[in-house]
Amino acid sequence: MARRLALLPPPDLIIQDEAHHLVAGNIWGRIINAWPGAHLIGKTATPERLDGKGLGVEAGGFFEALVLGPSAAWLVDQGWLARPKVFSWPGVRNSQGNSPGGQDPEGHSPELRQRMGEFDLEQAAHAFGDRAAIGDAVAHYRRRLHPATAICFCCTIEHAEQMATAFRADGIRAAAVSGSTPAEERRRLIAGLGSGEVEVLTSCMIISEGTDIPSVGGAILMRPTASLSLYLQMVGRALRPAPGKHEAVILDHVGNAHRHGLPTDDREWNLAGRRRREGVSIPIKDCPLCFCSCPSATQQCPDCGHLFLTGERDEQRRGLQQLDGELVEITGSARPRPKAPQQQRPRRRSPSAGCRTFEQLQQREQERGYKSGWARHVWAARQRSA
C-alpha cells in the first residue's frame, strides 16, 4: 500500500490492526500521514512498545484516546479465552506482575545482552540450545501437554531446527517454521498443527502475532524476551478457546513469567509510553539451591541463605545457567503480601552509578573485574543520549 498511495482514493476510515506497530516515521506511519483527513481506529491486545515510544498524540503518536476492552482475566472467566496454566522455574516471583509494566528486562543472567532493547537472540540460542535444555523441553511436553499440540517459540532458525529435531527423536511429530520457510510450506505446516498432523511446531520470528489455531493446546517458551507485548502475543497463540479445550498449558523454560507476570495479571495501559528501559536495574542471578532470583552482586541468597562462592559468580558471568529441574505451576494466589517499607530490599543500582567521568568508569571496571571495554561502552552510550 505504501508504494501505491497515489493510486488509491483517500479513505474516510482507517482501521489499523496490531496498532502497537504504528508510530510516526515507520511504514505504517507514512500511510496514516498520507491521509490526514481519515478517521483512525487502532486495535491491539498489547498497547505497549519495547522501545518505550508512546502511541498517543502527546507522545508523537497518532491516537487521541485509549478505549480499554475487557481484561484477560474477565475473558477467561467468561469462556472467551482458555484458562492459562503456567509452569515455570521454582522461585519465580508472581509479584513481578504488579510492577510497572510487569517487567524485569534484564532477565535471568548478567550475560544476557540486549540489542535495541531486546535480548541478543544468538546468545540466547547458544545458552538454551544444548542437549540438556532441549531434552527438558521434550520431557515436559510429554508430561504436561501431550497429546495436545503446541507451538514452541525459539531464538533463531537453527535453534528452532534443533528443537524440532529433538522432538522428532522422541517420536513426536514436529516441524520448524521461520521467515525463510517457503510460503506454501509454511501454510501446510500451520494447517497441519491445526489438524494434529503436526504435534509441535517450532518457530523463529513467526506466528507470534495474529495466527489463529484454536485447537493448539499450549505454548513452549524457549525464547527469552524483554518485551511484554511479545510475551503476551506468544502466550496468546495458545489461549484461543475450542470445543473440549478447558485450559492452555504454558511451559516457560526461560523465565518470561518471572519478567512479565501471568497472562491474566491486571496491567495498566496508557498512550503516553514510558522511558526506555524504565525500571531496569542491575542484572540478576538465580540461587542454585532454591532458584530464587536476586541481584548479581548478592553474596547470600535472601530466601534460603545459600552463600554464593567465587566459582559460582564466575559461572554466572559466563552465561545463563543450565538448570536441571521440574517446572512448577505459577498461580496468582501465591503472591506474597507487600513488605513494610523498612523490610523492603534496597533498590538495585546501576553498575555505573556514581561514575561521572570516563576515568571513574575505568576505575569501576577494574574494581569489579568487568570485561575490557565496559567503561568505553558505557561512556559512549552516555554521549549518544546526552
Image (spheres, grey):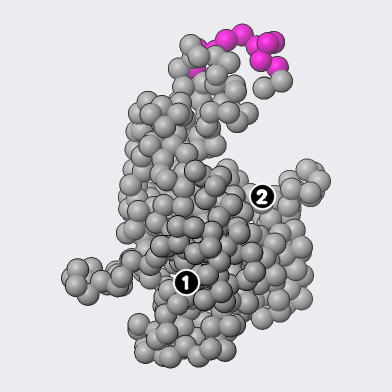
Residue 220 falls in image quadrant: bottom right
Q: Is residue 81 visible?
A: yes
Q: Relative to residue 198, is residue 213 depicted above or below?
A: above
At a point 66% along the width and 72% down the height, the residue shown is 127
Q: Which quadrant is the N terminus positioned in? A: top right
Question: Which numbered disc, 1 or 2, marks the residue closer to the eye?
Answer: 1
Q: Is residue 8 magenta?
A: yes
**Observer-nearest of 218 and 372:** 372
Given the image, on which type of amino acid does mark 2 rest?
Answer: Ile
Q: Is residue 12 magenta?
A: yes
Q: Crowding at label 2, few (<14), some or many (≥20) Cα neighbours within 10 Å?
A: some
Given the image, on which type of amino acid does mark 1 rest?
Answer: Ile
At a point 51% along the width and 47% down the height, the residue shown is 50
Please state the horizontal and vertical placement of residue 183, each as a whole percent of the image. 78, 43
Please state the horizontal and vertical placement of residue 319, each as a whole percent of the image. 62, 74
Q: Which residues are magenta?
A: 4-13
Q: Label 2: which residue?
A: 206
Q: Label 1: which residue?
A: 284
Give whichever of discs 1 and 2 has the lower sequence position: 2
**Secondary structure of residue under mark 2:** loop
Q: Relative to residue 209, is residue 108 depicted above or below?
A: below
How many tags in the picture? 2
At a point 66% along the width and 49% down the height, the residue shown is 206
Residue 6 falls in image quadrant: top right
Distance Cα–Cα, label 1 vs label 2: 29 Å
Residue 338 appears left or right of 192 = left
Q: Is residue 199 visible?
A: no
**Observer-nearest of 317 and 218:** 317
